[in-house]
Image: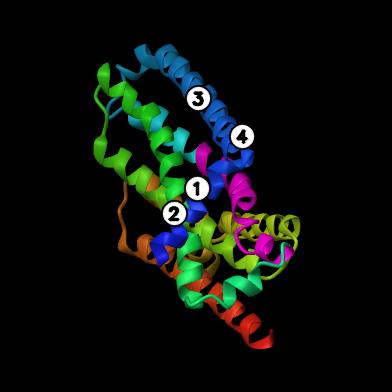
Amino acid sequence: MILTIAKREFRSMFMSPLAWVILAVVQVILAWSFFSSIDVFFSIQSELTTLKNAPGVTDLIASPLFELASIVLLMVMPLLTMRLISEEKRNKTISLLLSAPVSITEIVLGKYLGLLFFIVCLLVLITLMPLSLAMGTELDLTKLFSGVFGLFLALAAFSAAGLYMSSLTDNPMIAAISTFGLLLLLWMLNVSNASATDGNNVFSYLSLHVHFTALLRGILNTRDIAYFLLFIFGFIVLAIRQLETQRLQS
């Protein structure tokens, strides 16, 4: 049943022009950044040959692309998650969904999984850009994989937070704004590290950006992976509890 709901959610996304517009806009922005990074790389290539342990194509082109993608998608994901549950409430179809012979957990996981399918499609399009460079140069595939994996975990975390915020209101716009505010706060918590003596404070651990940056550098630390998994699990559980409360009240 989870897969059935996920497939329905995935199809409904592509039936809406919003998903196509988001795909187009994100690809245009990232493609512009990608080609700009290539131009910069060619302009400094002669200088890089004189440096010891000089950064390669993956460091100068692929990693900045994933960094920009995370920022752009932090602003875009609330637009995708805002309608997951709040639109059901606004259209008065949430009561039919809650009375269906499926559990709340299956409903939430199905909607979340459908959004993850869309994220995978988006990631494939983004990853094809740096992968195209393999035809003419050598890529650090380990660091490239780590960057893609980190971006996937970050987007999955954005989606889980957006799903929960969408379950709190029947207004998709309020859900989008509140999701963006929450994600921006969690993303910028590491700003406090500028005045800290080390990166082991609580704000550093709670920051999404700190854990994503570590994966972007090619450091596959179980601490960072566990953070994202706990983040996703926590917000999905909160969304399930929220819908269970609404079912009891209705």
Q: Residue at x 52, y 62 (%)?
A: 160
Residue that mark 2 sits on: 7
At which x and y percent is residue 224?
38, 60
The secondary element bearing badge 4 is classed as: helix
User: Which tag, 3 or 1, sits closer to the chain's start?
Assistant: 1
Evaluate whether residue 5 shows in this view. yes
Task: Pinpoint residue 16: horizontal percent, then vertical percent.
Answer: 61, 42
Judging by the rendered image, the residue that carries numbered circle 1 is: 11
User: Are circles 1 and 2 on residues that touch, CB within 8 Å?
Assistant: yes
Which span is picked out in magenta?
Answer: 68-90
The answer for how far apart the CA atoms under marks 3 and 1 are is 26 Å
- Quadrant of the rendered image containing residue 95: bottom right
Tell me which residue sits at (27%, 26%) in the image: 52
Q: Residues within 10 Å of mark 1 (few under 14, many from 20)?
A: few
Residue 150 image point, x, y percent: 39, 50
- Quadrant in the rendering for residue 188: bottom right
Q: CA distance from mark 2 to mark 4?
A: 20 Å
Find residue 31 and name its label. Answer: 3
* Viewer-proximal residue among 238 and 194: 238
**Which comes sooner in the sequence, label 1 or label 4?**
1
Q: Secondary structure at mark 3?
A: helix
Residue 3 image point, x, y percent:
39, 61
**In this rendering, would 169 be left or right of 36?**
right
* Residue annotated with mark 4: 21
Query: Which sits in the foreground, 164 or 199?
Result: 164
Q: Does residue 199 lie above or below 121 as drawn? A: below
Q: Amino acid at mark 4?
A: Val
